[in-house]
Image (cartoon, coloured by chain):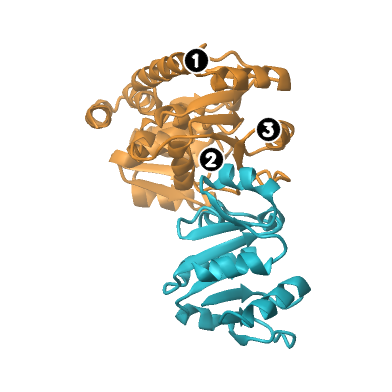
Chain colours: A cyan, B orange
Amino acid sequence: MIGFLIDNGNNESMVDNINSLSRVQPCIVFSGALVPKLQTNVLQRYEAFHYNGTIITDNFRLCQQLPHLGYCKKRYYYIQNYEWMDAEPLPYRIIKNTLLHPSVELIVNDQSQVKLMEELTNKKVKYVMNNWDVNVLRQIADE
Amino acid sequence: MKILCQDSIDYMVFRNILDNLRMVFDIKVIQDMSHISKALNEVSPDLLLLKSEDITGIVTAYCKKNKTKLIAFGDHTDADMVFKKELDMLRPNINTMSFKDKNIEKSGISVFVDNQSGKLVADFLAKNYNVKIFGNVKINSPKYLGVPSQVEKYEILNSSKYIIDLGTYDLYDGVLLDTYPLVYTNFNLDPAYKQFDNLVSLTECLDYIQDINNEEEIQSNLDVLKNSFFKENSTTFTIEILNVLGFSQESEALNTMLGENINDWISN
């Protein structure tokens, strides 16, 4: 089972690829807003606290919740943009609870991000997933 | 000994003295100076620390009558001891060593930037080097990782091999936590430090630390600096002040504590 913690459904590529995945894999979306285009199970975001599978978020703000999802098997932060650059102010404890948190694993959008993220976090990047590539999502779901 | 001090005196030497006195004595803090008479009567301090501009006739009269010692921060007062802003400087606080974590593997270069004068250098480092940047001045790079608290700063120093101090005075804490500092300054520091005042000399410093042939020399420089901090630090400075003011018993108490702490830190 793979879960997605999302802010809204504005990212069409994400929605399309989750829909493709849901045809072959059970998946679940935890969202703060209704996403009519999603053809899979959508639950209120707080339901993620009871979820016990693998979970992915691409949102820096929501990533702060990942360490608190106590039942999750694996927690991934999917870094597409370096969203912490927009945070102002940015207390270091937020970086500690997201990028640097030992229970949060990293997925990046592009091979060119790997070196930077590994140097910054001292962690191995687990996956390079271009624009919610459904094949990579399948690999993650199969772990 | 009873101590009364004013809140938020913006002097590094005040921070040094207060941190040390706090370890041994109870310190009362006054925030609103309009209540100084009441505070003096309630606390009956043996030692008073105030900004020069807030030392009124009432205060000096009280000190004379009750033999209270007065330390002033600023210019021209009748105080027993005066610290002027132009001579203000921070001294190493060796209590930082209690935050030493030997289990963390050291790696990488951390940059601390707290004022705009260091922004250009921080931008240059973010663009060209593998660094992590921290501090109150936001740098437009993913390598900027936010504003750490003091304890988080110790965590960062513990896990870093080198720090670049862009005017934040983290060089002392760095040395005490075995993190070699590169310091951005125009003043001549001890030759055991690496210092720079422009991008060219910064690049030279970075080339120096990245050359593995220099590792032994860097470690020996760190040891030299650390040993010098054991001899002269904010605690020894505070002890000296207490001695000058005639608080010999109190200075002895601080001296004993310092000796015990240094022995503990060295043996650990």
Of residues B189 and B49, the one nearer the viewer is: B189
Image location of residue B67, percent across then percent down: 34, 33
**SS state under label 2:** loop
Image location of residue B196, percent across then percent down: 64, 19
The type of residue carrying mark 1 is: Asn
Other-residue count near label 2 (Cα within 10 Å), few / some / many at <14 / 14–19 / ≥20: some
Same-chain check, marks 1 and 2 = yes
The type of residue carrying mark 3 is: Leu
Same-chain check, marks 3 and 2 = yes
Of residues B149 and B55, the one nearer the viewer is: B149
Quadrant for residue A99, please give it.
bottom right
Position of the C terminus of chain B, as image quadrant, is: top left
**SS state under label 3:** helix
The answer to which of marks 1 and 3 sits earlier in the sequence is: 3
Q: Which chain carries label 3?
A: B
**Residue beneath label 2, please?**
B9
Nearer the observer, disc 3 or disc 2?
Answer: 3
The type of residue carrying mark 2 is: Ile
The structure residue drawn at horizontal position 77% and vertical position 74%, both measured from the top left corner, is A12
Number of the label disc, if any, that sits on residue B125: 3
The structure residue drawn at horizontal position 71% and vertical position 57%, both measured from the top left corner, is A81
Nearer the observer, disc 1 or disc 2?
Answer: 1
Left or right: A13 in relation to A120? right
Number of the label disc, if any, that sits on residue B214: 1
Q: Which chain carries label 2?
A: B
Number of the label disc, if any, that sits on residue B148: none
**In 3D space, how far apart are the residues under numbered discs 1 and 2 (Cα atoms)?**
42 Å
- The answer to the question of whether label 1 and label 2 lie on touching residues, with beta carbons closer than 8 A, is no
**In 3D space, how far apart are the residues under numbered discs 3 and 2 (Cα atoms)?**
34 Å
Q: Mark 1 lies on which chain?
A: B
